Amino acid sequence: MKPAIVRLTASVTPVLPRWMLRAICVVYALSGLWGRDPWKNEDAAGFGVMWTLAEGGWHDWLFPNLLGKAITGSGPLGYWPGAASIRLFAFWLTPADAARIATALLFCIGCAFVWYSADLLGRRSEVQPFKYAFGGEPAPRDYGRTIADGALLILLACFGLAERGHETTPEVMQFACVSMWLYGWVRSLDCPVQGALWWGGALGLLALASSPPLAVALLAGSLLWMLFTREFRPAFSFRLGIAIALGVMVLWLGAAWSAFPENTHHYLRAWSAGGVERFNAFSARALIYALKNLPLFAWPAWPLAAWSWYCWPGLRRAPHIALPLSVILPLLALIGLQTAQTNRLFLLLLPALSILAAFGLPTLKRGAMNAMDWFAILSFTGLSAFVWMVWLAAQTGFPPPLARNLGRLVPGFQAHFNASACVIALCATGCWMLLVRWRLACHPKALWRSVVLSSAGTTLMWVLLTTLWLPFVNYGRTYREVAARISAHLPAGYHCIRPVRLGDAQLASFAYFGRMRFSFDNPACDTALRQSARNAPASRAFFSDFPCVASRSPYCAYCLRARSLGQSTEKCSSLSPQVWQPIWEGHRPADRDERFQLYLRVDRAP
């Protein structure tokens, strides 16, 4: 065993009270859950699938879909908690608010697994501080709990967790599963069978909540960790964990195959193909996007994690370093292989990064701790003051330049005073000021003192954004208003609407807010809704986007042949027995690039 490199006394390991940790997590999790609409894009799209499941039957739960459109980017399990929550709280809450209860619960479960994982790793003998001749070093139990407190505070301090951790998306379920996966492997070090139950269940749940490449990548990372470490050797527990994971997946597969064998076959093919296509090629744009956004998303976890790896040179194969890396490295590889510019995988990095970063806290110099504290004080105090100034400008029009800029960002928005939101924001700001005063006046010695201000500052900003700024953020990111305008222009007694180039977020929002009836393959649809970019010629481009549904007609035969040969299809509209007449065009007030056109099918005059 390598000698310990940390010299600490028991005075630096006071643990945070359990009620305080629970209160921080609950406040963070509940802020921004209610009083808002589903936001574009992933939040609204994920909610739409959950809402479809809650309104549908057994087939919808086995094969998630959005108003009949198959959703194979993630497995079915990621949508079940939200759908179940909608059904459970249907009589008390709106579907959107009810779905977020499951989001908050999964978020807290993930935080709990992160804390317990770091606690167990912090109690291991190889990470204990130097033992003095006459005692005075912290006990393993106290040291482990202090490390766990630091890991949880680092997790809550991550900038990207605020929005992604409060969305109705499958990624929140995946976040909880990855945290459970880490806890299972940590538990396996001391109790192999018990740990196998945890990580095996987590692997099965993750496979059903995500895509096959993600589960395979994490399993490959764990296999590499087992090869390079001496801490885990029992082959029986590994086979037990794999058997449990397969058993969890077989539960869904057996139910789906017994009820709908043909649909199960098609869904499995589409699910596997979609997962492979998502990571099947290197994309320079996606990589540049990750390099630009991941450092801010994972701040301050990633620099502390890098410092932790650097400061434990003799123990890099030990579980507290190697185990988080077995999750971080496969996820980074998947991020590098993404074909789309998205941060959906970034959230899954945070549990392992936070645990690894926590072990860098004991080795930080006092100057680094003070620098982190002053950065948090200056940045979050300044940002909170800016939030209050923008809120004041929205309420009073002062200062005028700020009010004019706000009017340009959210044109048409009318601010209204909300007393409860103002009181909550004042309380959060007051707590921040008291915490800053405590840090500057008392000079605490606890290991987690360097991250407590960062986590509190991130929580403060999220509370302010979801109280003071919530009305105009919600106004700028919801489709409620445009859905109402589209519904007002729909003909009375229309049969159905055929969507053209509509994204999943738009489909879900229009169906939820406007109660619109969409159909993807019904030839009887007499209206169509199309999404286009700004300044796109709607009348010319529309017919080429619209699928030919009357395949026996002469004009369809011509169009299909022209499309197959790569020829122009502009003559199709003149051959069609019907014409699509535009009856409305509009956009969301806060989005000038997104355009929607509503069409009505009318017979051509003879």
Image (cartoon, rainbow, N blue to C red):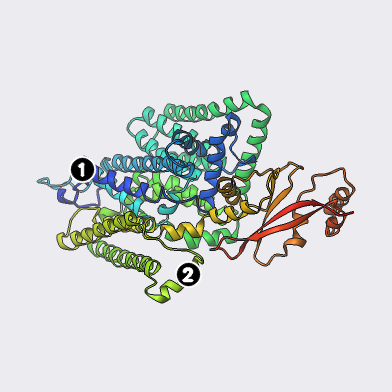
Q: Look at label 2 and name its amino acid.
A: Gly
The answer to whether residue 278 is seen in the rendering is yes
Lateral position of residue 101 relative to residue 24, left or right: right
User: 139 or 465, which lies in front?
Assistant: 465
Lateral position of residue 54 relative to residue 160, left or right: right
Q: Specify which label sits upstream in the sequence, 2 or 1.
A: 1
| Disc number placed over residue 102 in the picture, else none | none
**Category of crowding for the residue at label 1, using alpha-carbon neighbours closer than 10 angstroms: few (below 14), some (14–19), many (at least 20):** some
Q: Look at label 1 and name its amino acid.
A: Asp
Residue under numbered circle 1? 142
State the residue lying farthest toward the top. Answer: 258
User: 151 or 406, which lies in front?
Assistant: 406
Residue under numbered circle 2? 407
Secondary structure type for disc 2: helix
Lateral position of residue 131 relative to residue 568, left or right: left
**Corner quadrant of residue 286:** bottom right
**Corner quadrant of residue 399:** bottom left
Residue 70 placement (x, y as % from top left):
63, 40
Lateral position of residue 446 relative to residue 355, left or right: left
Q: In which quarter of the image is the C terminus?
A: bottom right
In percent of the image, x 73 and y 42: which residue is there?
A: 521
